[in-house]
Image (tube, grey):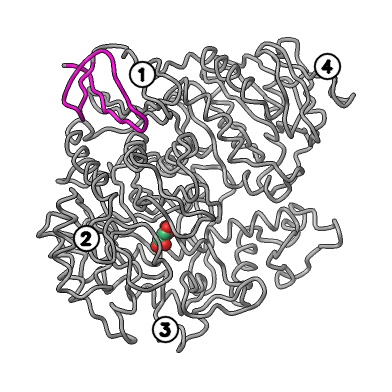
Amino acid sequence: MLRFLSCSRLSLLVALLSFPIAAARCQTATPIPSQIPGHDAVLLGTDWYPEQWPESRWEADLRLMEAAHIRVVRLAEFAWSTMEPSEGHYDFDWLERAVALAAKHHMVSVLGTPTAGPPAWLTQKYPETLLIDEKGQRAKHGNRAQGSVSSPRYREFCRKIAEQMALRFGHNPDVVGWQIDNEYGYAFMSYDDYAHKLFQNWLKAKYQTLDSLNAHWTTSYWSQTYDNWSEIPVPVGEHNPGLMLDWKRFVTDTWNDYQKNQIDVIRQHADSRQFITGNFMGFFDGFDHYIMAQPLTFASWDDYVGSGHVDPDHNGLSHDLTRGFKQKNFWVIETQPGAVNWAPVNNFLNRGEVRAMAWQAIGHGADEVGYWQWRSALNGQEEYHGTLVGPDGTPVPLYEEVSQIGLEFGKAQSALAGTQPVSQVALLHSYDSHWAIDFQRHTEKYDQVALLESYYRPLYRRAQSIDVVNPYASLGNYKLVVAPDLNLIPQDLAQHLLQFVQSGGHLVLGPRSGMKDQFNALLPQRQPGYLVEPLGGRVEQYYALESDFPVSGKWGSGEAKMWAEQLKPMASDVKVLLRYGKSNGWLDDQPAVLTRRVGKGRITYIGAILDDKLMNAAADWMIQVSGVTPVFGPVPDGVEVSRRHGEGKDVFILINFAKDSGHFALPRPMKFLLSGQQGSSLDLPAYGVEVLSAVP
Ligand code: GLA
């Protein structure tokens, strides 16, 4: 049970009923490399479910995996009924044989705890282990993620199976790590009376007195005043914004405690060399990932495109988001082998696209790329999902492309060892702010991920490397820090940001910044709250737009879309960079962007969502004013470049996501690690990839 008190943000140590809820709302970076000591720096993997097949078949599968240069298998995350066929009777012999056979074929194993799929004997005998949904219905057996995350009984069974697995495999040399649960049950909560009581106790531990809670939530509004902790509801649908935000934090703490219940017991019995990870899902926002990632060795995520084709900006941003959870390299522990089975149209990715995605992951800091799954079970809900071998056990056409990836990982191993992306630019991402805006979007189309992308896209093109970090992260190494939607800026966070500015950094705030405190209550200073004074300006009024409004100034002319704020300079040295044109009368000729030098740095406030043309000009200005240098140099449109940096070396990954081939000059002669050549210019066909390093 731990919270980092060095983070002066509201902190809380809570012991609740039968189990503790742990919470830590700020992040510390640990320098443990995610590479597995003694193994390749970047690894190709797949998900293998030996329990679904006769043992006589295993070796044929493993032989095919080895031939494709697969080096990691993830197993067991849905095998609870095979590992514990009846209460307290465990059978791990088959798993041990599977791990040993994989090792014979030069593959290491990652074991998933099977707690996203409890066995039928468990849920039937102990129905309280099944969650109750928002409508009061108890989940039924037969799907997954139906366990109640807050049920002490369910936790007891989860702990026991994790413990038994750790006792059996914690010292197994071929088991390199663990995955907890699977996608953390999509953050589902149980709405039973027990969970409700836990929430009330969580609030009590946080606020201590009802007076404090009533004041911070302004419960005199709509007669919500609480005289007893037991009166406080669980929010279903719209509710008090303070309560809704605390509910999300409670969900985070509950899931974090659920995973710690398993992590602690694994740590107790397993070698410290074995890593522990969890598979997140990009921008899924069911809980605060910065908190959930804390007890993990490194973060992983499941990178699926679904319908259509990869959007390199969205995908790159999602990789960078995941890397930022722990500020270190991560794994793409699941990705799409061509097609999924759950999207509106489950089209297949184009030839070469899977390879381009794999290399994009590596470029953004992944140390493993794993395909879900090797082979489809002959029955079960996911019969149609993409695989690497067909139901007959022979390779599907994509197998060849994946095996090419494995071969190429081999060629770049030594160059990539000990490297990671290093950036001069950071985007700030906060779950609290994200939730706060989503609770009250004010205009239904307000899409914060799209807003983040509108900054990421032009900035990435120019800087060619961006970190996405929690606002409390240490910012000292960045030249430019951009917060497109930091709605909640409590005083301690304002100080943290100001310190970055005063020591020479450039802070750019987007619309809706600094509107609220940590209780989701409006700040009386107006936006950007505690930063009004240093900015030397504030937001007079915000407007949700029915149509686009003109804006012009230093960045040229264009449009404000969806959202516009009327800004007011309040100090003589504040510069207005953009103004609105004729619009709704209120905004006509009013400032839309302010900037001011502060200490050795600068604060800029952008009060509108700007069109792409203006965002490009804004990015040019931000990069230039902040002194950011690109990590590589010019590349044609549609070509993505990323860099991994290590002691004395830089490795560049270039991928052509455009439809046409590209031929372009390199900033200097370089070695081509995949083709084995070297030169001063590069040809890249559509979906073409090359990995470059300096010529010695
Ligand atoms: C998720 C799950 C997997 C599988 C895939 C299918 O990522 O973790 O078990 O269901 O989706 O795309």
Give the CA distance from mark 4 to mark 1. 40 Å
Residue at the spot of label 2: 394
Nearer to me, 260 or 136: 136
Vertical arrangement, residue 220 with respect to residue 121, above or below: above
Going by the numbered disc 3, the residue's amino acid type is: Ala
Q: Is residue 607 among what the camera can see?
A: yes
Going by the numbered disc 1, the residue's amino acid type is: Phe
Q: Earlier in the sequence, mark 2 or mark 3?
A: 3
Residue 421, image x and y in percent?
35, 31
Q: Earlier in the sequence, mark 4 or mark 1?
A: 4
Q: Characterize the local packing of mark 3: few (<14), some (14-19) or many (20 or more) Cα atoms within 10 angstroms.
A: some
In this rendering, position of residue 163 left or right of residue 540:
left
Observer-side mark, 2 or 3, equals 2
Task: Tell me, yes or no, whether the highlighted magenta stretch contains residue 682.
Answer: yes
Which span is picked out in magenta? 670-695
Going by the numbered disc 2, the residue's amino acid type is: Thr
Residue at the spot of label 3: 120
Observer-side mark, 1 or 2, equals 2
Residue at the spot of label 4: 589
Give the CA distance from mark 3 to mark 4. 66 Å
Task: Name the secondary structure under disc 4.
Answer: loop
Q: Characterize the local packing of mark 1: few (<14), some (14-19) or many (20 or more) Cα atoms within 10 angstroms.
A: many
Q: CB of mark 1 within 8 Å of CB of mark 2?
A: no
Task: Tell me, yes or no, whether the highlighted magenta stretch contains residue 538.
Answer: no
Give the CA distance from mark 2 to mark 3. 33 Å
Residue 224, image x and y in percent?
82, 62
Q: CB of mark 2 within 8 Å of CB of mark 4?
A: no
In this rendering, position of residue 118 left or right of residue 176:
right
